[in-house]
């Protein structure tokens, strides 16, 4: 009971005071911080994910030293429309940097997912996600944040998940793979928040995004590891912030505070060099040299996932949960039994064919011997009978 009360307090604090910033946007649902899962939640399931990210560092020299930061808070709402279809709403509630104060709210992301498309008895599941970004914020192309020109953006991502044990996926290790494409829809637009807005995009910007993630579960804690990044196919205007490619490594821990609540902690480390490809007005950078020029070299984040539906998760005992899991796996077990029976029938048929083949080979051997005997008799000279 004390754990439940503490969990609610932490959830409320995170919801009211969101923190932290950067990179590919967080996922929620069954996924990790950045890498999506190909497994569906199921029909009638609803959960919400409060996510917060932060980067901060001292910059400047002498008496002009000050703290620079990038802070972002978001909420993700995931709805299971069917056993294979999910809808996700992801508004960035708060975005702030030392350079640009205030996007409340920031942009809105909507995702439509087709998941769990593989054989339910298979260890590999796959799916596809269609995503869009609506420019509800006042300011865009924010330093230290992924590129956005303030237009409607669309894209898709191919998802793959490998389950170490498909019968008990929640208790087994999982590996996730993502590969996506983002269409920025920004040709001819002037970047009003860029360091120099006199240059417009000559063509539409687009990029590939990719990710790899691992979750290894324990009784109360899960260990997670992620690699994610982007690669521009067509880069934005030369005056845009974060027009470089980046690659991050993200170790994390996930604490199972209750059956209906999970708390995630993680730290991102940039593996790509701090290469700045932005062209600044009069060649003067707006940030001190001690600070990263493109993407932050690190960032810390925290997330809280709350299960809202079904409500039975709040009042069910461990016994009820086990029975419910067994019931949900009945179809899977039945399919496994059917496949096993079909395999046994196929093996029996194969054995019968082998026996028939052995019989046929024996018959051919006998026929061959008979033919050879007849051939020898025919080739022998006939003996003449003696004269009387």
Image: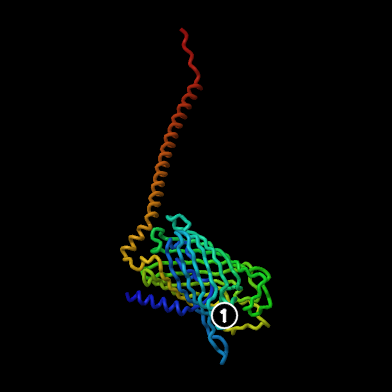
Judging depth in this view, the residue of 196 and 107 nearest the camera is 107
Residue at position x 44%, y 58% in the image = 123
Q: Is 365 situated left or right of 238 in this image?
A: left
Residue found farthest to the bottom: 63
Judging depth in this view, the residue of 353 and 267 nearest the camera is 267
Residue at position x 36%, y 77% in the image = 6
Q: Residues within 10 Å of mark 1 (few under 14, many from 20)?
A: some
Q: Position of residue 215 (x, y in %)?
A: 44, 67
Report the residue marked by disc 1: 292
> In the picture, residue 83 is in which quadrant?
bottom left
> In the picture, residue 138 is in which quadrant?
bottom right
Judging depth in this view, the residue of 44 and 168 nearest the camera is 44
> In the picture, residue 256 is in which quadrant?
bottom left
Q: Position of residue 229 (x, y in %)?
A: 55, 69
Q: Element at badge 1?
A: loop
Q: Position of residue 313 (x, y in %)?
A: 36, 66
Residue at position x 53%, y 86% in the image = 67
Q: Is 231 situated left or right of 224 in this image?
A: right
Pick the quarter of the image with the N terminus: bottom left
């Amino acid at each position: 009971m004390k754990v439940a009360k503490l969990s609610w307090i932490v959830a409320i604090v995170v919801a009211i005071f969101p923190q932290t910033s950067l990179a590919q946007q967080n996922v929620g649902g069954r996924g990790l911080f950045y890498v999506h899962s190909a497994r569906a939640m199921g029909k009638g399931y609803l959960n919400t994910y409060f996510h917060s990210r932060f980067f901060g560092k001292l910059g400047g020299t002498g008496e002009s030293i000050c703290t620079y930061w990038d802070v972002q808070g978001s909420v993700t709402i995931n709805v299971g429309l069917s056993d294979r279809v999910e809808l996700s709403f992801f508004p960035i509630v708060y975005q702030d940097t030392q350079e640009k104060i205030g996007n409340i709210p920031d942009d809105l992301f909507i995702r439509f997912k087709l998941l769990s498309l593989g054989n339910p008895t298979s260890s590999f599941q796959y799916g596809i996600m269609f995503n869009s970004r609506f420019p509800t914020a006042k300011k865009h192309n924010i330093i230290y944040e992924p590129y956005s020109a303030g237009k409607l953006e669309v894209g898709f991502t191919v998802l793959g998940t490998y389950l170490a044990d498909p019968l008990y996926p929640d208790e087994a290790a999982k590996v996730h793979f993502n590969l996506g494409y983002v269409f920025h829809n920004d040709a001819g637009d002037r970047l009003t928040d860029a360091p120099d807005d006199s240059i417009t995009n000559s063509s539409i910007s687009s990029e590939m995004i990719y990710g790899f993630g691992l979750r290894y579960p324990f009784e109360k804690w899960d260990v997670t590891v992620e690699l994610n990044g982007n690669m521009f196919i067509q880069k934005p205007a030369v005056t845009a912030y974060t027009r470089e490619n980046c690659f991050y490594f993200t170790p994390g821990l996930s604490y199972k505070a209750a059956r209906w609540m999970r708390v995630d902690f993680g730290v991102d480390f940039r593996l790509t060099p701090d290469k700045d490809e932005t062209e600044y007005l009069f060649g003067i950078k707006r940030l001190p040299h001690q600070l990263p020029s493109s993407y932050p070299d690190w960032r810390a984040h925290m997330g809280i996932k709350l299960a809202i539906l079904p409500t039975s998760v709040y009042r069910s005992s461990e016994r009820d949960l086990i029975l419910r899991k067994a019931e949900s796996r009945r179809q899977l077990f039945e399919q496994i039994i059917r496949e096993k029976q079909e395999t046994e029938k196929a093996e029996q048929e194969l054995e019968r064919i082998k026996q028939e083949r052995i019989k046929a080979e024996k018959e051919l051997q006998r026929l061959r011997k008979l033919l050879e005997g007849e051939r020898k008799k025919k080739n022998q000279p006939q003996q003449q009978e003696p004269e009387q």
